[in-house]
Image: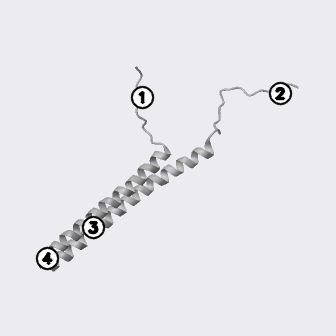
Amino acid sequence: MKTHKPSKHRSPGGDVGSGTGDIGKGAAKGTGAAAEGVGKGAGDLVTLHPIGAATDVGKGAGVAGKDVGVGAVKGTGKIAKGTGRGIGKIFHHGHQDDTTTPSPERQN
């Protein structure tokens, strides 16, 4: 039985898909961090700790911004890589120099 080894390199479409996933993960983590900060801040307001509330909301917003930014940068890089490789395949397909086959010569 023949088994296939997993490919070491991802296809251009795989890079684009993975990049899109990274952007989504970053947005989801950022949303979670923002919600956590707002939730803690609301709890602090209810217990009459306004300084803690402001700190928690600010901290949640900061972490959210970082998570979204990291996901966007990481994902955009993968999308750009995949797109560039895909375009490269279009322009370089069939333009390989094969010097092992002799070219037909004209007889005069």
State yes or no: discs 1 and 2 in contact (Cβ < 8 Å).
Answer: no
Q: Compared with residue 29, is residue 41 higher up or lower down, i.e. above or below? A: below
The mark lying in front, picked from 4 and 1, is: 4
First in residue order: circle 1 vs circle 2: 1
Question: What amino acid is labelled 3 in the image?
Answer: Ala
Name the front one of labels 1 and 2: 1
Callout 2: few (<14), some (14-19), or many (20+) C-alpha neighbours within 10 Å?
few
Horizontal and vertical percent for residue 36? Answer: 22, 65
Label placed on residue 4: 1
- Mark 4 or mark 3, which is nearer to you? 4
Q: Nearer the viewer, residue 23 or 99?
A: 23
Residue type, label 4: Val
Image color mode: one colour
Label 1 residue SS: loop
Q: Neighbour class for label 3 at 10 Å: few (<14), some, many (≥20)?
A: many
Q: Is residue 1 above or below residue 76?
A: above
Q: Label 1 to label 3, Cα distance in Å? A: 44 Å
Q: Position of residue 86 (x, y in %)?
A: 54, 47
